[in-house]
Amino acid sequence: MVINIIQPLAGGTPVPTQRVLGQRALGLWLVVVAVFIALMVVVGGATRLTESGLSIVDWKPFTGMVPPLSDADWLKEFAAYKLSPQYLKVNQGMSLAAFKSIFWWEWGHRELGRALLLVFVLPLSLFINRARTAIQPWLPRLALIFAIGCLQPLIGWLMVKSGLKSDPHVSHYRLTLHLLTAMWLFAATVWTAFDILAPRSGPLKRANLMLLGLLGFQILLGGFVAGLRAGFAFNTWPLMGDRFAPEGMWSMLPGWQNLLSNPITVQFMHRCVAYTVFGYGLLVALRAINQPDSRMKRYGALLATALLAQVVLGIATVVSGVPVWLGTAHQAGAVVVLASVLTILHYDRMHISVLKVTT
């Protein structure tokens, strides 16, 4: 059954009903939320690469939004940092000016999270009060996104806390969980926006789902690379040193531990899965480009371009010694590739026009 969501004017020209306008506003709001989440991922990557994540040694969800405003405030914040393992074992003798540079990255990342909460909650409240009919079908999904989003700051703090003990490095498991949760939130928000703005039905294509699964595994490995600083293990390409599979990959005992905690092995796996995602992703993109649907052609070209750009960024990041700007761009590229895969996965189904008139 197709619901008539068009009301004709006296002259016969159809105009959207209030529900359609509400759904469009709802979808566009979720696009804005997704952009904020993507920005969080990118800033989080820069915070990690600048080793700024341990600069704020406590978690104040409400009062922490106010940064140091006076010299006395800065000295107090700096004194707290001087008691941390990162200062004592890594940054001993750091100047106040250098501390401020890492403090602002972490503070900005946390503030962006608070801004994201407002961007989500305030419009959501408005939709519930003013456009209940439009938002009603989506409330369970939005509630799940909100609930997991509320867990994300806690996951982030547990990650930071793991680096405030004797070892001044955060747990790569917790960092990866933090990254995967952010990517899930981005994907869930984008998918819901697609469902609202361009409803489609029919089974998801298995080939596209396989690409999404491969990409998810590659993002997981990317979290391991970041947490273990595995990008510094070898800064050569296409070989790692003078070999495809370098020595030291199985130096840890028991052997399976190398797959989780050996920087050399993790970088090797990240490279191999990258080649797999790139090759298989190009096949999916070419399939889309060869379809008669002009929009599918554009989406296929977008995916191919995103994949190529991401591979180039990854190689450049490795061979240049993982500079902050390239590493950050590489993390942003992962978000773009994910968005491209989701676009093809969603669109490559039977189309249902939201503007169809029924009699």
Image: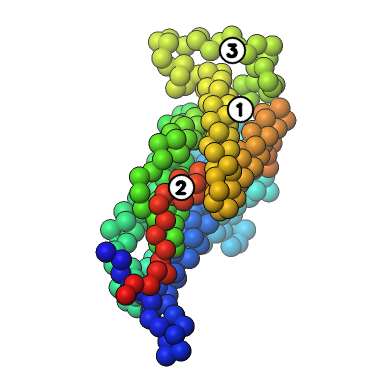
Crowd band around label 3 with a 10 angstrom C-alpha radius: few (<14), some (14–19), many (20+): some
Chain-order first, disc 2 or disc 3: 3
**Percent of width and height locating residue 109:** 53, 52
Image quadrant occupied by the N terminus: bottom left
In the image, taking residue 264 as reference, residue 13 lies left or right, namely left
Chain-order first, disc 2 or disc 1: 1
Label 2 is placed on what type of residue?
Asp
Q: Nearer the viewer, residue 52 or 119?
A: 119
**Picture quadrant of residue 2:** bottom left
Crowd band around label 2 with a 10 angstrom C-alpha radius: few (<14), some (14–19), many (20+): many
Residue 334 visible in rendering: no
**Percent of width and height locating residue 260:** 44, 22
Label 1 is placed on what type of residue?
Gly
Residue in the picture at 67% in, 45% down: 98
Residue in the picture at 58% in, 48% down: 297
Q: Name the residue under label 3.
A: 245
Q: Is label 3 in contact with label 1 (beta carbons under 8 Å)?
A: no
Q: Mark 2 points at which residue?
A: 348
Q: Mark 1 points at which residue?
A: 231
Which secondary structure lies at badge 2? loop
**Picture quadrant of residue 225:** top right
Closer to us: mark 2 or mark 1? Answer: 2
- Rounded to the nearest angstrom, the CA distance separating label 2 from label 3 is 38 Å
Q: Is label 2 in contact with label 1 (beta carbons under 8 Å)?
A: no
Residue 278 visible in rendering: yes
